Image (cartoon, rainbow, N blue to C red):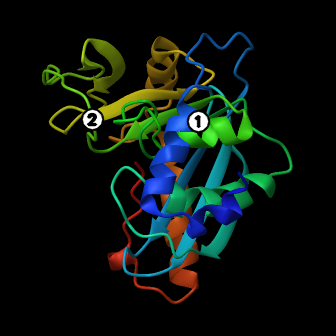
């Protein structure tokens, strides 16, 4: 389905589409070397139909910015937890298509398979593009875990009904963990290893941190109040 048609789906149809896509998910070892990585983020007011999408691409593992891409779009799909991809993917897809070259891995500010139907934004976007994707979320959406130790890179597995769906990772001392789950075409362990190499003293990894700054910038330039920014992914 073309992402431009998402806003015409009902929530029930969106859930059915997630269940249809779920059978295509590939959580497997990425064999090719990672030389470039990108972060993606969305900024929006949940009461507005206007969305700001941004992607920042880096060399890896030295994390030097080599490209950026942005897009501004509208959506009428409602703000519903677990279905936010149907609001956000169309704008991100436009920003993705505007990149002159595609990264080896894309990190999205949200869930991968750590989702009720294993269809978080990172998984959805990976299935749409075929790109290896990782979800790096600031809050837990799904799965049980024990709080990791308060030291950098302490980990705690996240499970749902006996299935490992992600890792709660302490990326900075005295801060809440972040929640790492593979999206598509990459393994859980690789996802965690990649995110660790992208931590640069902040709680969130550099790819999504820089993408977050980028979407805030274009939002302000468009005359919107940055304090109304959400930028959530599920």
Total tally of numbered discs in the picture: 2
Question: From the viewer's perspective, is 203 left or right of 128?
Answer: left
Find residue 231 and report its horizontal and vertical position in percent: 42, 61
Residue drawn at the location 31% of the way across and 35% of the way down: 178
Residue drawn at the location 39% of the way across and 29% of the way down: 180
Q: Residue furthest right?
A: 100
In this view, the residue in front, 124 or 140, is 124
Q: Which mark is residue 142?
A: 2
Q: Are marks 2 and 1 in contact (CB under 8 Å)?
A: no
Question: From the viewer's perspective, is 198 left or right of 138?
Answer: right
The answer to which quarter of the image holds residue 47 is bottom left
Question: From the viewer's perspective, is 201 left or right of 173?
Answer: right
Question: From the viewer's perspective, is 108 left or right of 165?
Answer: right
Residue drawn at the location 68% of the way across and 42% of the way down: 128
What secondary structure is marked by label 1?
Answer: helix
Residue drawn at the location 59% of the way across and 69% of the way down: 8
124 lies above or below 155: below
Q: Is residue 211 visible?
A: yes
Q: Residues within 10 Å of mark 1 (few under 14, many from 20)?
A: some
The residue pinned by badge 1 equals 21
Find residue 4 and report its horizontal and vertical position in percent: 69, 64
Of tags 2 and 1, which is closer to the observer? Answer: 1
The answer to which quarter of the image holds residue 150 is top left
Q: CA distance from mark 2 to mark 1?
A: 19 Å
Q: Which mark is residue 66?
A: none
Q: Residues within 10 Å of mark 2 (few under 14, many from 20)?
A: many
What secondary structure is marked by label 2?
Answer: loop
């Amino acid at each position: 389905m073309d992402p431009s048609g998402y806003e015409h789906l009902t929530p029930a149809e969106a859930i059915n589409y997630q269940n249809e896509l779920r059978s295509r998910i590939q959580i497997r070892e990425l064999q090719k070397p990672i030389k470039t990585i990108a972060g993606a983020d969305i900024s929006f007011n949940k009461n507005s139909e206007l969305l700001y999408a941004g992607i920042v691409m880096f060399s890896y593992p030295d994390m030097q910015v080599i490209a950026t891409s942005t897009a501004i779009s509208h959506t009428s799909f409602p703000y519903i937890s677990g279905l936010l991809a149907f609001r956000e993917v169309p704008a991100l897809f436009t920003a993705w298509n505007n990149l002159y070259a595609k990264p080896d891995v894309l990190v999205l500010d949200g869930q991968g398979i750590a989702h009720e139907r294993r269809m978080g934004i990172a998984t959805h976007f990976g299935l749409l593009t075929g790109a290896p994707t990782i979800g790096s979320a600031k809050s837990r959406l799904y799965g049980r875990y024990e709080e990791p130790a308060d030291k950098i890179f302490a980990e705690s597995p996240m499970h749902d009904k006996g299935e490992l769906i992600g890792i709660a990772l302490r990326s900075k001392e005295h801060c809440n963990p972040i929640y790492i789950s593979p999206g598509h075409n990459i393994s859980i362990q690789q996802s965690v290893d990649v995110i660790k190499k992208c931590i640069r003293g902040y709680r969130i990894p550099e790819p999504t941190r820089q993408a977050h700054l980028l979407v805030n910038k274009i939002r302000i330039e468009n005359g919107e109040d940055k304090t109304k920014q959400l930028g959530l992914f599920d």
